[in-house]
Amino acid sequence: MKRYIILLGFVILYSNLFSQVEKTKQNEYDVNFETNQNDAMFPGGNDSMMIYIWNKINYPEDALKNNVEGVVQISFDVNFDGKIRNIKALTDFGYNLEDELIRVVKTMPDWIPASINGIKVRQQFLLSFPINKYNVQKYKN
């Protein structure tokens, strides 16, 4: 019986030693990957884009009558050639607010495409546009 207890003690001791995990050695070199990334941009920047939209947008008559206002959101892709594709409305205020903003975006000139390390890439763009009758009247006059 004494032998079995001693044997059992050795088995437990050695099984514990073999079950320990060896620490992994960390890399000796820190590598810094720098990328030069530029987002897609409307020609002239965001301010020019907003002025362009305000000058082109027509506040729908039904929305005006019902005092409908809010932040209309749409998304679209700016392809590597600067063309806008896959325009989708993300809000649904009704009264053709989203349709009107989509109409204006379709008339935009080609954008400056996004790039990573000098290579032109496609980028999805989210446009949040506050629209109400006061803003539209302000920019139309």
Image (cartoon, rainbow, N blue to C red):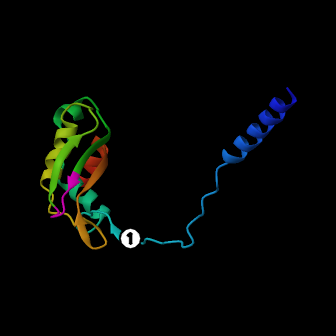
> Which residue appears at 54% of the width and 73% of the height?
29
> In the image, is residue 11 above or below residue 124?
above
Looking at the picture, how far across and down is residue 114, in whole percent? 27, 64
Q: How many marks?
A: 1
Quarter of the figure with residue 39: bottom left
Looking at the picture, how far across and down is residue 10, in whole percent? 78, 40
Residues packed near mark 1 inside 10 Å, few (<14), some (14 to 19) or many (20 plus) = few
Looking at the picture, how far across and down is residue 80, in whole percent? 18, 63
Front one among 130 and 66: 130
Front one among 136 and 24: 24
Tell me the residue that label 1 is attached to. 35
Residue 101 belongs to the span the image colors magenta: no
Looking at the image, can residue 141 be seen? Answer: no
Looking at the picture, how far across and down is residue 137, in whole percent? 25, 48
Task: Read off the magenta span.
Answer: 77-82
> Which residue appears at 18% of the width and 46% of the height?
87
Quarter of the figure with residue 120: bottom left
Q: Disc 1 residue type? A: Thr
Query: Which image quarter holds the C terminus?
Result: bottom left
Q: Secondary structure at mark 1?
A: loop
